[in-house]
Image (spheres, helix red, strand yellow):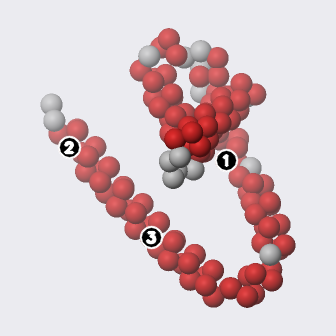
Amino acid sequence: MIASLSLILICQLVGEICVRAAGVPVPGPVLGFVLLLLLLLARDRLPVLARGPLTGGAVEGTSKGLLAHLSLLFVPAGVGVVQKLDLITTHGIAIITVLAISVVLTMLVTVGTFLVVGRWLASLREEP
């Protein structure tokens, strides 16, 4: 489990380094998890990569363990909200408006992405 967690964190670190070095407007952890996804896909296609934490579903098991305790990661955010209550009372309407708009936009982009990927996968299945 420690090796798998280390692999996850190393991918996140590499993503952060790449983002800062290249100046790309993408969060480092997002790029790191794309790297981890590519690594896992490569592991499934190339048996030589199935070593260490990449064997026996160790990364998947560690990820499930992290997801099981995901609510603990919201504690620092909750503390930050309580510390900035004066800003929330001052700019509450603007914050709620921005949050509502961003949620709607995120949902629309997510649905669009799923539709595009679904059509793309369907077209791949139809080709012999």
Disc 3 is placed on an element classified as: helix
Check the image and name the residue furthest to the left.
Answer: 128
Return the x and y of residue 59 as percentages of the image width and height: 62, 31
Q: Can residue 68 be seen? A: yes
Residue 94 is tagged as none
Q: Residue at x 73, y 88 (%)?
A: 90
Horizontal arrangement in the rendering, residue 22 relative to residue 92 (left or right): left
Q: Can residue 30 be seen? A: no
Q: Report the residue marked by disc 2.
A: 123
CA neighbours of label 2 inside 10 A, class few (<14), some (14 to 19), many (20+): few
Q: Are marks 3 and 1 in contact (CB under 8 Å)?
A: no
Check the image and name the residue furthest to the top.
Answer: 48
Q: Amino acid at mark 1?
A: Leu
Spatial separation of the CA atoms under disc 3 and disc 1? 25 Å
Q: Quadrant of the N terminus?
A: top right
Identify whether 103 is placed above or below 30.
Answer: below
Q: Report the residue marked by disc 1.
A: 67
Q: Residue at x 50, y 11 (%)?
A: 48
Q: Quadrant of the C terminus?
A: top left
Disc 2 is placed on an element classified as: helix
Q: Amino acid at mark 3?
A: Leu
Q: Nearer the viewer, mark 3 or mark 2?
A: 3
Spatial separation of the CA atoms under disc 2 and disc 1? 33 Å
Q: Report the residue marked by disc 3.
A: 105
Horizontal arrangement in the rendering, residue 122 relative to residue 21 (left or right): left
Return the x and y of residue 31 as percentages of the image width and height: 53, 42
Residue 105, image quadrant: bottom left
